[in-house]
Amino acid sequence: MTPARPPPVLEVADLVKDFGAFRALDGVSLRVAPGSVHAVLGENGAGKSTLVKCVMGYHRASSGRVLLDGVEVTPDSPRRAQALGIGMVYQHFTLVPNLTVAENLVVARADLPFVLDWRTEVRALEAFMARTPFRVPLDAPVRSLAAGEKQKLEILKQLYLHSRIVILDEPTSVLTPSEADDVLGRLRELACAGEISVVIITHKFREVVRFADEITVLRRGRVTGRGKVADLTPAQMAEMMVGVAPQDAPPARGPTAIGPPRMRVEALCADDELGAPALHAISFELCAGEILGIAAVAGNGQEELVEVLAGQRPATGGAVRVGDEIYAPTRAAIRRLGIRCLPEEPLTSACVAGMTVAENLAFRDFDQPPFAFAHLVSRPAILARAAAAIADYGVRTRSPETAIGELSGGNVQRVVLARELGAGAAGPAGDIRVLVAANPCMGLDFRAVGEIHDRLRAARDRGVAILLVSADLDELFALADRILVLSGGKIVHETRAPAADMAVIGERMAGHV
């Protein structure tokens, strides 16, 4: 693949971005050398997303400059940024599921004619595919692709649009380790060949060390460090981010032994959004004092499993038992049986963004004493409990009455954890018997990840049965006592965590038997 011209030097000079009285970026400068892989690191809320959105034209900077080869440019919209050769691959897919791969590529162009000569377009696409490092079938509907193929298609789309600078936002969060290494390795090959430059936002130090040339570190909207990756250790990068080094190894398991089965899933079946079978008669047991990990790449039935257990999707067959009772996930049953859920994307699936932190913390028990009397809600009691939860869980918010949608991802997750693990649940924390957690740390920085992992371990050691669904094998190996692999809606592998082989699990996740 040969672009029209080599990638330019991308520079950001003294960039400032204000949102009212809040300064999200405070004099940020960055330089991306041609043909390099440049990693941008920082805590959640450090300004990384705001920075790249200013470069992409989603936000207009309050002051400062963006330059290409020393010439100031004004990317005042994503389309203008694309015209300048700057493209972005987002954390969540931006593909049209019911269109084919070829159709998704063509409709992304800004220069589409009123009438398409489809045969000519297909020949051009076949020639393009022959020169690219990735292979995705042109005639395949996007909805039929695995997560890894969708991520490759997102990257192919940027190459097809002649992006010379490609920005990637957490590009490997939906990939197996081998897929992640393949994608980043091929992008690095393109960069080393001088065909593109890559800017990658990631929290995974392993990826930075292996694939990046340089880093820029942000903290609270300011640059706190930069340098060549070869000259830095992960501990030094972490100290630039937050002032502390990441934990080298997870702490030992607490003294609580794994107890009897708390939840039994029996031949459970469920359909996806299009009515196609997504779960094929899966069965497993979840025990008290155990973290049972479900390893799965996106689109293999884990979303439907979580939704069935949370009462957001009906099962089409089988049953779930909690103790000796058939579990019907009504609000009353969820409260009585002590079932809690920490879904993926909690801001959209577990919160109301426009409501306050205090109100979101109260969802489980606002109609129960001491928060309600004779159908009247006690706002002082809700605010007092929220203040205690905020302090206990280290939630960074201006006040309990701040809209939860204004918080960073890590702080939203802390609020939901506080609610689901006891601070927001009816009765004492001991009433929680089962917690279903789906990708609880996706997109979070290592300090937020460490805090959430510690909370989950503490709940397990109190005897809570935890079902942990995650595409991140590092997370499963750090937390799980036992691991199941879900692929194609079926359980295809089971192992005790101490005896688990990451390569074998990665292969099973990818559908290789």
Image (spheres, rainbow, N blue to C red):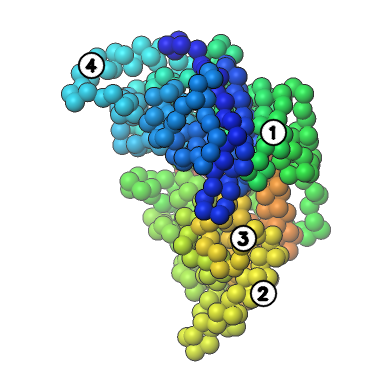
Residue 155, image x and y in percent? 46, 26
Amino acid carrying label 2: it is Pro
Q: Is residue 370 left or right of residue 450?
A: left
In this figure, which residue is indicated by the disc labeled 4? Answer: 119
Residue name at image x 77 percent, y 23 percent: 231
- Name which quarter of the figure residue 70 lies in: top right
Task: Report, in whole angstroms, how far the alpha carbon at label 4 lies from the one at label 2.
Answer: 66 Å
* Res. 355 mark: none
User: Which mark is first along the chain, 2 or 4?
Assistant: 4
SS label for mark 2: loop
Taking 249 as reference, is 67 above or below it? above
User: Which mark is first along the chain, 4 or 1?
Assistant: 4
Residue 26, image x and y in percent? 62, 42
Nearest to the eye among marks 3 and 1: give it: 3
In this figure, which residue is indicated by the disc labeled 2? Answer: 428
Residue name at image x 44 percent, y 31 percent: 75
Q: Are marks 4 and 2 in contact (CB under 8 Å)?
A: no
Work out which quarter of the rendered image holds the N terminus and state it.
top left
Q: Are marks 2 and 1 in contact (CB under 8 Å)?
A: no
Q: Would you call the spot at circle 3 few (<14 residues within 10 Å), some (14-19), or many (20 or more)?
A: some
In this figure, which residue is indicated by the disc labeled 3? Answer: 397
Amino acid carrying label 1: it is Phe
Taking 299 as reference, is 132 above or below it? above
SS label for mark 3: loop
Q: Are marks 4 and 3 in contact (CB under 8 Å)?
A: no
- Name which quarter of the figure residue 383 lies in: bottom right
Taking 433 as reference, is 342 above or below it? above
Amino acid carrying label 4: it is Arg
Task: Report, in whole angstroms, how far the alpha carbon at label 2 lies from the one at label 1.
Answer: 38 Å
